[in-house]
Image (spheres, rainbow, N blue to C red):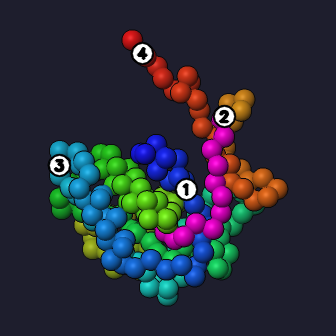
Amino acid sequence: MIKELIIRNRSYRRFDESEKISAATIGKWIELANLSASARNAQPLKYAIITNPEMCAKIFPFLGWAGYLSDWKGPVEGERPVAYVAVIKDRQIADNHYCDDGIAMQSILLGATEEGFGGCMIGSVNKAKVSRLLGLAEKQELLWIIALGKPAEQVVIDPVNNGNIKYWRDEKDVHHVPKRGLDEVLVYTD
């Protein structure tokens, strides 16, 4: 059950823009992040939900989409995210967020996947410009943007071939993500 959900939770970069997501729905997914583990239980993360099409359009140019697909400039109109979640660290609460961001984003995306949506954690962000667009305070640090929408692409998992871990797209535009086998990642067992 959880394995199937994790397999379906891929990094989607193309979406069906006709399928909207309400802020209330995204709020349910953020509640999952809020209920998840937090280092020292400090809970320094905050979240900005962006569903307004004009604001989404303003954020889009400040995002990098797929480093390994050097000839692809990102989703075209009609395939762009319909919502974003800005993951923000509140430095008034803690200077270090440890691994809270990864746990939180995985929880949000698992919630989205369970409801038939998907997303992509984006670290390639012009943080200064997006922070200004969002009106973040000095003590609020933008960490990540999560792009959200109804997936409009097929993403499949393949075994790593000859050590190559770079994702790629085939002639049918299927997105392939190589994953190392358990025999390669398991270091110790009784």
Q: Amino acid at mark 1?
A: Ser
**Which residue is rendered at x = 30% and y = 45% of the image?**
98
Magenta range is: 146-160
Q: In the image, which is nearer the foreground, mark 1 or mark 3?
A: 1
Residue 51, by quadrant, is bottom left
Expressed as whole percent of the image width and height from the top left, the position of residue 63 reads 55, 67
Q: Looking at the image, is mark 4 or mark 3 earlier in the sequence?
A: 3
Q: Residues within 10 Å of mark 4 (few under 14, many from 20)?
A: few
Q: Residue at x 27, y 74 (%)?
A: 137
Would you identify the image quadrant in which residue 162 lies?
top right
Residue designated by label 2: 160
Tag 1's secondary structure?
A: loop
The mark nearer the N terminus, 2 or 4, is 2
Indicate which disc, 3 or 2, sits on the residue closer to the N terminus. Answer: 3
Q: What secondary structure characterizes most of the magenta part?
A: strand
Which dot marks residue 189? 4
Mark 3 or 2: the one toward you? 2
Residue 11: image tag = 1
Give the SS element for disc 2. loop
For badge 2, the amino acid type reads Val
In-front residue for pair 189/125: 189
The amino acid sitting under disc 3 is Asn
Q: CA distance from mark 1 to mark 3?
A: 28 Å
Q: Is residue 62 above or below residue 155?
A: below
Asked if marks 2 and 4 touch (Cβ < 8 Å), the reply is: no
Q: Where residue 56 sits in the image (x, y, percent)?
A: 49, 80
Spot the residue most to the right. Answer: 171
Q: Is residue 175 left or right of residue 29?
A: right
Kind of residue at badge 4: Thr
Rendered image: mark on residue 41: 3
